[in-house]
Image: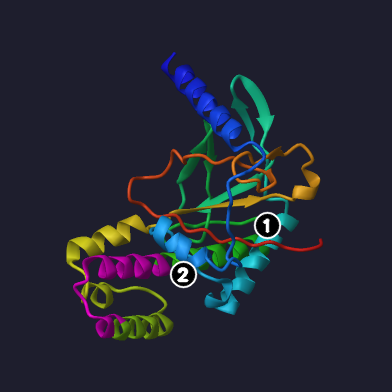
Amino acid sequence: MKRRAGEREKELKKKKLLEELGENRLPYMTPEDADFHQLWKTKYSKLIFRKSDTVPEELHQMVQEAFLTLRKHECFFQDLVRIKGKDFLTPVSRILIGNPGCTYKYLNTRLFTVPWPTEGYDIKYCSPQIQDACKALIRLNDYLHIEAVKALEGQNFFETKEIKDTTVIDREQNFTTSLTEKGSISKDQSSCCVREDDYVSLRNRTSYNVTLLNYMDPLQMLYLKQEPYFGMGNMAVSWHHDENLVERSTVAVYSYSCEGE
């Protein structure tokens, strides 16, 4: 009963908001807008935005080829989920890749990982191409983990204001050089400017053990709903809270839009 009452309350709030807005939807901004970067720095201080050209081109190529390989081998599947007593096929097709034995749950549906190559496990793939795709995704995962640690460390520096700008610049240069040479993070590299407890916390908050891949062709989905708040057009997934998230954990997102076939 409490859950139903909560749902009704949400619906009433949404209805009231839409009535107040009328034809004027809330504005949303893209990176092309002049005030975009200033907005997300002030309103979304925990959001770290990176342009695609800051990511190594070799990694882009590997990951995007992996996406297309998984599509070619028909590894993406729609899920049958139940919402408010009715069964629906999700408009988004998914595959979960990650550490062996890990799972991801949404809408009472649990996905099990297709394991990526992991030391200590004898993992066999049905084709070498799928194995290469999983290797590419763990490479992306490692890269995003390193970038997340760097970003969180940078936020800590600016928030506490305990380190001078020149020290930060020198450290970032040393960090980048070390990553290029070794391709990984060592405790000695990071702990020089971060307390040990904070270092362990950062490592735990950015320990990405799964990668959830979502695919959708909007031209093939004629029944998509309109996004109600910002006038952003058809939507595949509405705004929601991910029940899997652990408090103070981080989420890394890689977005790729392919054109044509």
The residue stretch that appears in magenta: 146-168
Q: Is residue 152 left or right of residue 163?
A: right
Which residue occupies the foreground of this view, 196 or 125? 196
Residue 44 shows in the view: no
**Residue 35, x across and y down, in percent:** 52, 65
In the rendered image, which quarter is residue 31 located in?
Answer: bottom right
Rendered residue at 45%/46% (across/down): 102
Which residue occupies the foreground of this view, 90 or 140? 90
Disc 2: which residue = 143
Disc 1: which residue = 70
Who comes first in sequence, dot 2 or dot 1? 1
Which quadrant, please, contains the C terminus?
Answer: bottom right
Could you classify mark 2 by the number of other residues whose Cα lies within 10 Å: few (under 14), some (14-19), or many (20 or more)? some
Residue 28 shows in the view: yes
| 165 part of magenta stretch | yes
Badge 2 amino acid? Tyr
Q: Is residue 206 left or right of residue 140?
A: left
Disc 2 is placed on an element classified as: helix
Q: Is residue 214 left or right of residue 13?
A: right
